[in-house]
Image (spheres, grey):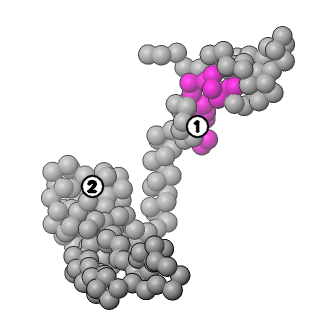
């Protein structure tokens, strides 16, 4: 395992008087910017929540990130899922299209449904074209040809008929009924 060097460790950076500034552990000079020198020279920094060493680039350790995720989920509003869209498991990074899929997953993985942190998804649609499409190329007084306007209408109708092309986690969690949906 590589040696852990914390942000506040003297090995992370040193102040060099002959240069009149901070030099990181790796030899980069930062002048009066002690914070940047220490950051460049460290491999780990203290977790903002618990103080445990966490790899540089993260502010919070995995355990504390999990606690934050659980608290955020707990505070999320609850509504009844329409069972038309998708559900997303924040805990497992997995999408579900039905309660049956959720139940099967819980059974296969031997996990309780409340541990999945299910979130109701919002649909993502392809973007529509507006009637300003191509207007930047027209002369000041120019207008789109009727054939182009008709094509835009046909295109937009086709896009609307396609419906959702993907799903993203929303901001609501589903009401989980006690009947048939818990293990």
- Please identify the quarter of the rendering in which residue 133 is found: bottom left
Q: Is residue 93 above or below residue 60?
A: below
Residue 37 at what x, y percent from top left? 70, 25
What separation in Å lies between label 1 and label 2 (alpha carbons)?
Answer: 28 Å
Q: Residue at x 17, y 62 (%)?
A: 101
Mark 1 and mark 2 lie on one chain; the one further toward the N terminus is 1
Q: Residue at x 46, y 40 (%)?
A: 62
Taking the image as drawn, is residue 57 in sight? yes
Q: What numbered label is drawn on residue 47?
A: 1
Q: Is residue 144 magenta?
A: no
Q: Position of residue 153 (x, y in %)?
A: 29, 85
| Start-end of magenta stretch | 37-53
Q: Is residue 42 magenta?
A: yes
Q: Quadrant of residue 152?
A: bottom left
Residue 94 is tagged as: 2
Number of the front mark, 1 or 2 = 2
Residue depicted at x 23% and y 63%: 96
Q: Is residue 59 above or below residue 52?
A: below
């Amino acid at each position: 395992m590589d040696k852990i060097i914390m942000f506040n460790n003297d090995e992370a950076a040193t102040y060099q008087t002959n240069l009149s500034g901070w030099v990181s552990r790796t030899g980069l000079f930062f002048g009066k910017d002690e914070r940047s020198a220490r950051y460049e020279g460290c491999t780990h920094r203290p977790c903002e929540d618990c103080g445990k060493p966490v790899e540089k680039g993260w502010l919070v350790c995995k355990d504390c990130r999990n606690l934050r995720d659980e608290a955020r989920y707990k505070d999320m509003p609850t509504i009844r899922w329409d069972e038309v869209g998708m559900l997303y498991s924040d805990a497992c990074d997995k999408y579900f299209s039905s309660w049956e899929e959720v139940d099967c997953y819980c059974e296969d993985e031997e996990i309780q449904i409340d541990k999945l942190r299910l979130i109701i998804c919002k649909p993502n649609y392809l973007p529509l074209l507006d009637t300003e499409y191509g207007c930047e190329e027209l002369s000041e007084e120019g207008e789109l040809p009727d054939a182009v306007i008709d094509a835009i209408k046909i295109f937009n109708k086709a896009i609307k008929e396609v419906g959702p092309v993907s799903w993203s986690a929303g901001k609501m969690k589903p009401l989980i009924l006690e009947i048939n949906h818990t293990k």
